[in-house]
Image (cartoon, rainbow, N blue to C red):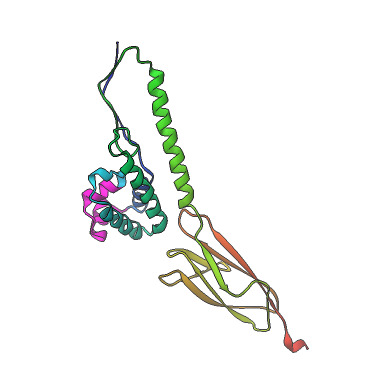
Amino acid sequence: MVFWKKKQLILESALGGILKKERIARCISIDDIEKRTNIQKRYIVFLEKSDYSSLPGKVYVKNFIKNYADFLNLNTRYILEIFEKEYLFFEKTKDDKNGIFKNVKISNFRFIVAPKIFRNITIAAVFFLCFCYLSGEAKNISKPPALNIYSPLNNLVTSEQSIKIIGETDRGSQIFINDKLIIADSEGKFSENINLQIGVNIIKIVVKKKYTRENVVYRKVLVIDESAD
């Protein structure tokens, strides 16, 4: 006769882990988060554990997460996408004691000839599913910001020796034009005048966020010298 003693396995979720790691990386305490976002301390703890069963309704939780992500200057759109997926999974599994977003408890199970391999395979399968899920969400988080350049068009020919770069990117992105930092407005729109030289000019526009890859766009502008005619 084999008895399994009571154990508790807690799985760290994608969203809770992202919020907690970012807060710790910035050396921000939970008390500071509470003061700056007006989210109660106990709810912040539950958010970082993705303990949705201890949080109020979905509308309130979504608002908590949006405020938290904005305060940490994270990509709010992707954070909320992760939340929607997690919460949907939570709702489907909240009555399942082995749900991936709950504490997995193995307690007082009694087996006749219960081989350890069965337990190990079960735990390994749970961790494998978690790894696949987290890997997929990590790719979304690291996705480069969008970048649209409205002016100038590529391969532009002009006689002007200055030009205005006009574009738009995701809010909170860092923008560099020829390695110079450019400030965008609150919606991610930006414009910058740059000087050109006679001949071919290559303009490099780069946008990026913390934890994401860069998005790079080039514009080639040919400046002709009309005085040479």
Q: Which residue is painted at 74% across and 89% down in the image?
A: 227
Residue 45 rendering spot, x and y as whole percentages? 26, 47
Task: Find residue 51 and report its image quarter.
Answer: top left
Pick the front one: 53 or 32? 53
Residue 38 in magenta stretch: yes
- Depth check: 200 or 116 in front? 116
The image position of residue 115, as x and y in percent, is 38, 15
Q: Is residue 160 left or right of residue 96?
A: right
The image position of residue 185, as x and y in percent, is 43, 72
Question: Residue at position x 55%, y 64% from top?
Answer: 206
Whether residue 155 is situated above or below residue 64 in the rendered picture: below
User: Which residue is pictured at 59% across the width and 79% down the height?
Assistant: 163
Vertical position of residue 155 compared to residue 134: above or below: below
Residue 64: tell me if it is visible.
yes
Please state the extent of the stretch shown in magenta in the rendering. 28-47
Quick one: quadrant of the N terminus? top left
Q: Please state the horizontal and vertical placement of residue 205, each as a whole percent of the image.
A: 57, 67
Name the residue at 47% across, 51% down.
Answer: 140
Residue 213 lies left or right of residue 93; in this view the side is right
Q: Is residue 75 visible?
A: no
Q: Name which quarter of the figure residue 91 lies in.
A: top left
Q: Could you tell me which quadrant the C terminus lies in?
A: bottom right
| Residue 190 placement, left or right of 228 | left
